[in-house]
Amino acid sequence: MTLYQPFLDSAIACLNSRLDIQPYPIPEGFEHKSAIVGKGKNQEEIITTSYAFQSPKLQQIRAAHVQGGKSLQVLNFVIFPHLNYDLPFFGADLVTLPGGHLIALDMQPLFAGDREYQTKYTEPILPIFHKYQQHLPWGGDFPEEARQFFSPAFLWTRSQDQALVETQVFAAFIDYLEAYIDFVIAADVITNPQMLANIEQRQLQYLHYRAEKDPARGMFQRFYGKEWTEEYIHGFLFDLERKLAKISGKG
């Protein structure tokens, strides 16, 4: 059992029990990928496994799980709502490297500067944030350009303690996900044309930023090459732009 497998298993079970989730198509070649790195006693197999689902209100629920021994464990778990809902994104980046554990967990707002939006989607989860903040202190600076994509409930921490990841981080991950599912269940369809245009624009801005700045790009390129990596990022991890292009006949 790897460090983040229980997170993934519990998340899928939670989603299955509360939402009508169905498989989301994963392009050929992305469900499972492996590579051998290092030499001799330092040789290690790196395995990347992808998971994807969808539901009536969520266009893509997807996970990339990287397993490379004790010094490399990664779970990137993101949920994208359909474009006719004003739901935030759910984002979890759980990363274990030789230097320790990097944890980022948030419901990333579509409209961070909108007071009414924050009242609707951020204020209800602030008690969860404060509950875990005492165990998972602020992890330090992150890029200024990224701030617009995070909420005041952004849980960002660094730790050397694996037991903390297995307990407090796991509990926070599940609590955030459960709260997100509550939002999904309560969400109403947006019909206002201007609001729909704003949602699409904001989702694409978010995807552009995440795809361009994906911190896993260098890692994947080392393991699997540039061509596979770019196709994985744009053709699976952040595929909305391609899907919209196909719908409009531009793809």
Image (cartoon, helix red, strand yellow):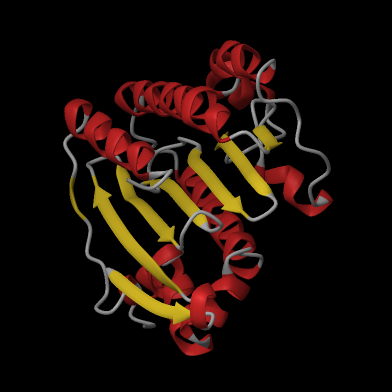
How many discs mark residues in the rendered view?
0
Q: Residue at x 18, y 27 (%)?
A: 17
Q: Is residue 222 above or below residue 201?
A: below
Across and down, in percent, residue 240 comes to: 42, 64
Q: Does residue 46 appear to the left or right of 72 in the view shown?
A: left
Q: Residue at x 59, y 55 (%)?
A: 206
Across and down, in percent, residue 52 comes to: 28, 55
Across and down, in percent, residue 180 comes to: 42, 27
Assign the N terminus to one quadrant of the image: top left
Assign the C terminus to one quadrant of the image: bottom left
| Residue toward you, 197 or 124 | 124
**Residue sitting at the far front:** 41
Across and down, in percent, residue 79 comes to: 41, 45
| Residue toward you, 147 or 119 | 147
Residue 65, by quadrant, is: bottom left
Q: Is residue 245 above or below residue 124?
A: below
